[in-house]
Structures are given as structure tokens and as C-alpha cells.
Image (cartoon, rainbow, N blue to C red):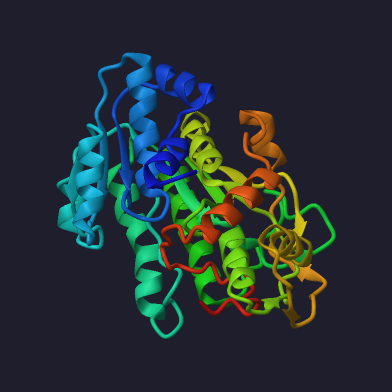
Amino acid sequence: MQNITELEEQLSKPTTGVIDTLANLQGDVMVLGAAGKMGPTLTHMAKRASDATGASRRVIGVSRYSNPDEQSKLEAHGIETIRADLLDESEINALPDVPNIVYMVGMKFGSTDNEALTWAINVHLPALVCRKFSKSRIAAFSTGNVYGPTASRGNGSVESDTPNPVGEYAMSCLGRERIFEHFSKTQGTDVTIIRLNYATEMRYGVLVDIARKVWADQPIDLTMGYVNVIWQGDANAMALQSLAKAASPPLVLNVSGPRIFQVCDVAEQFGSIMKKRVSFQGKEDDKALLGDGQLGYRLFGRPQVELEQLIEWSADWVMRDGESLNKPTHFEVTDGKF
């Protein structure tokens, strides 16, 4: 991973499963929230997979595009873009009718002290989208935060577990899921709900958060002592493949890494690679936010990038002062306040 171009090429490289999925799906694909952390590479993956099938398909990325460079980059890949404020119902209704929707819009950071907007984005907006795209199949991103903490030395929460969200952000995310579930049942809209935790690449993610603190000789907070992560390219691939599994009522799907790791162990690995002494603060809780991704692996195969590779890539990137999105995950937060 020598530069951004190489990184984004890897993040957007479609797997055989994605290519096969889009070869068998009819119609165009539209990504709502295409300019977020994951949106650009997921949208590009959809385009690359569609091109590989030889299908004549529009791939459309919708966002406010507060950073015009993201819009230009998508267009350079042959992706159509639409600039829209999705909280404006008239702008949603002006979008083209598309049979395949990937819904990636959400608010997390800044949700504390801005709870009204958090609920508007995470709960009200999905209702507008469901009404507009009642005949579409929708892969809707959610978060493993809806489960609440589970035993840190267990295998993580599974899809059948009863949600127990902590804090208004997580509660609003469960609200988002319930809106999709309601309209799926009442309109017959086929939906998958993707409970993600945590996607990572070189510019952001839990591993990058830990690596940057080790490199900067800052203490590692052990309050959230166990985490699982998934390479963003693998998460992109599973999300796109999940379109083919959309159902009414919705299919709920964890998208999580196959290994639960101990934060202190990974920090020590970074310390060894970086030749840094690692310090810690806080005490491990006996619970953590963890997801069991076995259902997704049975449906779509295991992630292609293993934890050891992610650690090596992250350490190298940070030591070379690679570009950062400057969006810490705050994975160590236990009170749900983001």
C-alpha cells in the first residue's frame, strides 16, 4: 500500500462473488451516501463489477458532496453522480427509480448535543427513502452498536440476539432498522440490514487509531479491551452481495471480522513493528461491542484479508505518515456518547 491510488484500487477490487451477484441482478445500482468513509470505494466496486459482467448498467452515487473532489473521482471512474440533500423529501423524490439501492447514510460522530439531527438522519430519512423506493431491493447499513455490550471473551453477538442499544446514537440506529423493517413488512420491500463493526483501511479504523497512538507514544485505553475488525474491501463486497439476499421481512446480517482480538495484544504488535514502548491506561471491562460474522461467511465466504496483514499494512502506513481521514472511531467509548 504505497499510495492512495493503490489503496483505493484494492478497496474497490470486486471479488468473484460480487461479480457473480451483479451478473445475476437486473437493473441499475444507486448508492445513497456515496461520499462517506466507505461510500466511494463501495460505489467504485459496484462499477468495476458491473463492467466485468459486460452489463449495460448505471451505477449512481448520491451525496451532498461537500468535498467536490469525491464527486470528481467517482465521475472519473464512469460513475454517475447526483448532488442531493436527502433530508429534503423533494430531492429524494426527484431521484431516478432504481431497482438496487445501497443505503449508507448515517450520523454518528457529533450525535451527542445534536440528538435531534441524529434522529432525523438515522430514523426520519429512512422512512422517506422507503416510500420512494418501495419496489427496490435495499441493502441498508446499520451498526453492531445496536446489540450493546456482550461478553468480551465470547464469540460476539449474533443476528438473533435481542438488541440492547446504549446511548442515543445506538438507539437511533435501532430506530433506523425498525423503519426499514416496518416498510419492508407493509410494502413488501426486500431489505438486508447490515450490522457493521468495524470496517478498517489505512486512513481510518480501529487498527489505525491504535497504531497512531503507539507511534505517537500515547497511552492505549483498555476500557474496550476486545474488538473485531474487517477490511473495508471485504465489507464492501459482502454489502454488495447482500443485495441478492434482500427479503421481506429483512435479512439481518453481521459484517464483522473473523477474529476477536485483545487491544493490548495488537498494541504490543504495533510496538514491536514500530520499535516503540507501549503504555496503557484504564482497565478492561468484561464486556465489549462484538459481532459474530459467521452467517455472512456461510453466505459469501470468509474475508480475504486477515488481521495480521491489516496490522502490517496499518503500521507501515502510519510510520510513513500516510494520509489520514482524521476521523477516529472512538471504539473505546462505553457509554454510547459520540
| Total numbered circles | 0
Q: Residue furthest top?
A: 54
| Relative vertical location of residue 159 with respect to residue 285 in this rendering, above or below | above
**Image coords of residue 333 (percent x, y):** 62, 76
Q: Residue 73 location, x and y as percent?
A: 24, 44
The residue furthest bottom is 113
Residue 107 in view here: yes
The image quarter in which residue 127 lies: bottom left
Which residue: 75% across, 69% down? 225
Quadrant of residue 36 within the rendered picture = bottom left
Where is residue 292 shown, x and y percent of the image?
Answer: 72, 48
The answer to whether 110 is drawn above or below residue 13 in the figure is below
336 or 126, which lies in front?
Answer: 336
Give coordinates of residue 119: x percent, y percent: 40, 71
Residue displayed at 39% across by 47% down: 4
User: Relative to 143, is 28 on the left or the right?
Assistant: left
**Image point (46%, 82%), residue name:** 112
Q: Is residue 227 left or right of residue 21?
A: right
- Residue 296 against residue 168 in the figure, above or below: above
| 272 and 132: which is toward the camera | 272
Q: Would residue 204 appear left or right of 60 to someone viewing this image?
A: right
Question: Is any part of residue 136 visible from this angle?
Answer: no
- Against 114, residue 99 (above or below) is above
> Which residue appears farthest toward the front when viewing the image?
275
Report the residue at 50% width, 39% height from top: 239
